[in-house]
C-alpha cells in the first residue's frame, strides 16, 4: 500500500513537472511573439532583392507593383470581394506584416479593424498611409459621421497622389533604385492620366437628367465630384453602418420621382438593400434594373484585368455610362473588360 502511494506521489510530481515545463515554454514563446511587435526597431534597405512589401487593399498593392517592379515581392492582405471596413486580420496576415520590409495601407480609417496592428508594426518597419499627401480641403466628410471619406481611389487624379507617396517611400527605403522608382511612377501616372480622361468622357456622355448612380454604400462620392455625376449610397461611408427603412424609402422616392432606370450592386457588399430598392420601386409602378456589379472597396480577382486599378475603374465607369444611357465601348477603354462585366 505504501509502495502504491509512493508511486502515485512520484507520478503526480512527474506530471506536475511536465505540465510546469510545457506551460513555462509556452509562456516564453508567447512573450517572444508579443515582444516582436513591442520592440521599437525600424528596418530599412538591406541590399537583398526582392524585398518584401505588404499592402492592405488591392488598390494599394497595385501601385506598389507598378512602381517597385521586380525589386519587390508584393503581398496584398485583403483579397478580392472582401470588405476592408470590417476585415479582421488573421494570425497569418499579422505574420505577413511582421515579415515584410515595408508596409503600405490606404488610411482614413478604411482598414479600421487593423489600426492597432499597423501601429505596432510601424515600430519595427516603415509603414505608410498612401493618402497622407492629400490636403484637408480635398477630403470629403460624410455628413454626421465626423470621419473623412476614405474612398479616394474613385477619383483617379486624387489617387495619383498615392502614387507619389509610394514612389517617395520606396526611394527613401531603397536609395540605389531611386531613379527606377521615379521612372516607373512617371510611366504609371501617364496611364492614370489616360484613365481619368476616359472616365470624364464616358460619364459625360450620360444625359444630364439621368446622371445619378445609386449603390449599396457611399463609396463613390469622390467619383461623383470628379466626374460630375450625382451619387447616393443606401449605407454610409462605412459598411459597418446599418441602412434603415427610412433610408430605403427615401431612395425609392428618388427612383420613382426621377424615373431612374438602374441601380448598382457592389462586389464586396451585400446586395440585400439594393434588391429592397428594386422591390420598393416596383410596388409603386416603376421598373428598375440592376445596372451591373461595381468594384468599390476591392478590385476584381487577381490575374484579371479587373484585378488591376486601371481595370477596376475602367470597368466601373464603362458599366455606369452604359447602364444610364451614355456611350462607352462594351469592352472598355482598352478592349480588355471581360464579357461578363
Image: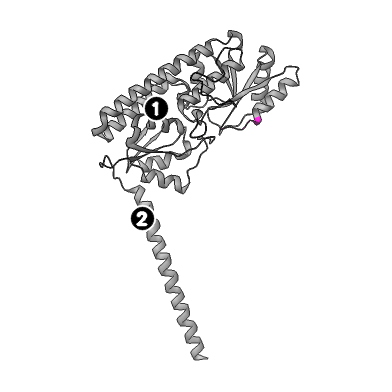
> Compared to 26, does 331 lie above or below?
above
* N-term-proximal mark, 1 vs 2: 2
Residue at 69% of width from left, 23% of height from top? 278
Q: Quadrant of the C terminus?
A: top right
Q: Quadrant of residue 264?
A: top right
Give the CA distance from mark 1 to mark 2: 33 Å
Q: Quadrant of residue 232?
A: top right
Report the residue marked by disc 1. 131
Label of residue 39 in the image: none
Foreground of the two, 160 or 194: 194
Q: Please, what is the dominant secondary structure of the magenta stretch?
A: loop
| Part of the protein shown in magenta | 268-272
> Compared to 285, does 73 lie above or below?
below
Report the residue marked by disc 2. 32
Q: Is residue 107 visible?
A: no
Q: Quadrant of residue 331?
A: top right
Residue 308 lies in the magenta-colored region: no
| Cβ–Cβ under 8 Å for marks 1 and 2 | no
Mark 2 surroundings: few (<14), some (14-19) or many (≥20) residues within 10 A? few
Q: Position of residue 133 (x, y in %)?
A: 35, 24
> Compared to 178, does 158 lie above or below?
above
Q: In the rendered view, does 231 fall on the left or right side of 65?
A: right
Residue extending farthest to the top is: 208
Q: Secondary structure at mark 2?
A: helix
Foreground of the two, 193 or 266: 193
Q: How is the image coloured?
A: one colour
Foreground of the two, 139 or 92: 92
The number of discs equals 2
Q: Position of residue 125 (x, y in %)?
A: 32, 41
Residue at 57% of width from left, 11% of height from top? 206
Q: Secondary structure at mark 1?
A: loop
Mark 1 surroundings: few (<14), some (14-19) or many (≥20) residues within 10 A? many
Amino acid at each position: 500500500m505504501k509502495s502504491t502511494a509512493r508511486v502515485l506521489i512520484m507520478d503526480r510530481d512527474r506530471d506536475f513537472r511536465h505540465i510546469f515545463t510545457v506551460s513555462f515554454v509556452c509562456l516564453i514563446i508567447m512573450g517572444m511573439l508579443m515582444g516582436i511587435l513591442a520592440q521599437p526597431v525600424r528596418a530599412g534597405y538591406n541590399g537583398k532583392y526582392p524585398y518584401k512589401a505588404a499592402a492592405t487593399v488591392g488598390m494599394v498593392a497595385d501601385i506598389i507593383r507598378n512602381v517597385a517592379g521586380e525589386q519587390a515581392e508584393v503581398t496584398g492582405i485583403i483579397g478580392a470581394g472582401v470588405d476592408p471596413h470590417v476585415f479582421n486580420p488573421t494570425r497569418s496576415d499579422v505574420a505577413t506584416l511582421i515579415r515584410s520590409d515595408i508596409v503600405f495601407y490606404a488610411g482614413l480609417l478604411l482598414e479600421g479593424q487593423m489600426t492597432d496592428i499597423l501601429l505596432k508594426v510601424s515600430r519595427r518597419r516603415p509603414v505608410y498611409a498612401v493618402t497622407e499627401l492629400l490636403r484637408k480641403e480635398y477630403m470629403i466628410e460624410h455628413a454626421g459621421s465626423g470621419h473623412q471619406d476614405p474612398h479616394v481611389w474613385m477619383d483617379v487624379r486624387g489617387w495619383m497622389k498615392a502614387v507619389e507617396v509610394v514612389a517617395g517611400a520606396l526611394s527613401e527605403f531603397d536609395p540605389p533604385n531611386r531613379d527606377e522608382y521615379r521612372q516607373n511612377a512617371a510611366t504609371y501616372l501617364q496611364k492614370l492620366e489616360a484613365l481619368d480622361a476616359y472616365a470624364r468622357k464616358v460619364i459625360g456622355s450620360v444625359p444630364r437628367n439621368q446622371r445619378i448612380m445609386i449603390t449599396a454604400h457611399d463609396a463613390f462620392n469622390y467619383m461623383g465630384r470628379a466626374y460630375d455625376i450625382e451619387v447616393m449610397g443606401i449605407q454610409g461611408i462605412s459598411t459597418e453602418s446599418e441602412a434603415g427603412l427610412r433610408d430605403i424609402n427615401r431612395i425609392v422616392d428618388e427612383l420613382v420621382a426621377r424615373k431612374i432606370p438602374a441601380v448598382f450592386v457592389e462586389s464586396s457588399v451585400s446586395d440585400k438593400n439594393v434588391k429592397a430598392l428594386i422591390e420598393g420601386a416596383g410596388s409603386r409602378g416603376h421598373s428598375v434594373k440592376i445596372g451591373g456589379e461595381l468594384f468599390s472597396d476591392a478590385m476584381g480577382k487577381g490575374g484579371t484585368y479587373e484585378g488591376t486599378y486601371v481595370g477596376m475603374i475602367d470597368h466601373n465607369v464603362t458599366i455606369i455610362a452604359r447602364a444610364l444611357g451614355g456611350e462607352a465601348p462594351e469592352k472598355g477603354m482598352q478592349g480588355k473588360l471581360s464579357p461578363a462585366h
